[in-house]
Image (tube, grey):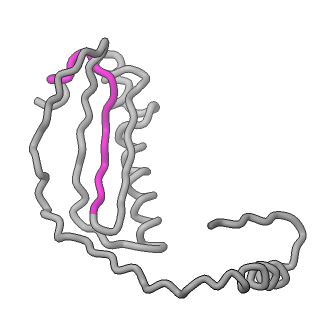
Amino acid sequence: MLLFITGPVDPEKILALVEKNQEPKGYKSEQPIERRYPEESPAAAKKSSRIQMAVQTPKCLIGFKEGHTGRSGKALMAHELTVRLLLELMFGRGTENYQMLIAEGLIDESFSFDYTEEAAFGFSIIGGNTKEPDDHVN
């Protein structure tokens, strides 16, 4: 459960109010959750994958597996911001790469990129709609 309170309130009084409200409900103390993260191979599970579908415009997505995971807190935030900034510098709408791909008709406005990192995995993904998906991977 999440409780959001805004405004000029005393946090200590609110916490006391919530604790007093919840105390008679007799919740049992829960055991700590045991999380298991299987060992992740540094190599990609598949080099490539193609799915044939009845779509008007094909898509091409390229992923890059993160080689080092397990960051948390400020280290994770700094790494995510660094990778996203790098992706923006390489593929953002104002870059030569983006302008060239648009001019050659290889991508359209759907083109995007992102980075995700969790406790046991991480990846960057780049792509979007394209009339020539094979031109991106060769």
Q: Quadrant of residue 119?
A: bottom left
User: Percent from the top left, x then y, of residue 39?
Assistant: 17, 70
Residue 21 vertical placement versus 39 (above, below): below
The quarter in which the C terminus is drawn is: top left
Q: Quadrant of residue 129?
A: top left
Determine the residue positioned at 29% across, 53% down: 123
Determine the residue positioned at 86% across, 79% down: 10
Residue 98 vertical placement versus 44 (above, below): above
Q: In the rendered structure, does residue 122 fall within the stretch colored magenta?
A: yes
User: Percent from the top left, x then y, of residue 26?
Assistant: 64, 85
Count of picture labels: 0
User: Percent from the top left, x then y, of residue 73?
Assistant: 47, 74
Q: Is residue 133 left or right of residue 79?
A: left
Q: Quadrant of residue 69?
A: bottom left
Q: Nearer the viewer, residue 138 or 25?
A: 25
User: Percent from the top left, x then y, of residue 105?
Assistant: 30, 15
Report the span colored magenta.
121-134
Q: Is residue 26 left or right of residue 104?
A: right
Q: Is residue 2 left or right of residue 128?
A: right
The quarter in which the N terminus is drawn is: bottom right
Determine the residue positioned at 49% across, 84% down: 30
Q: Is residue 41 left or right of residue 61?
A: left
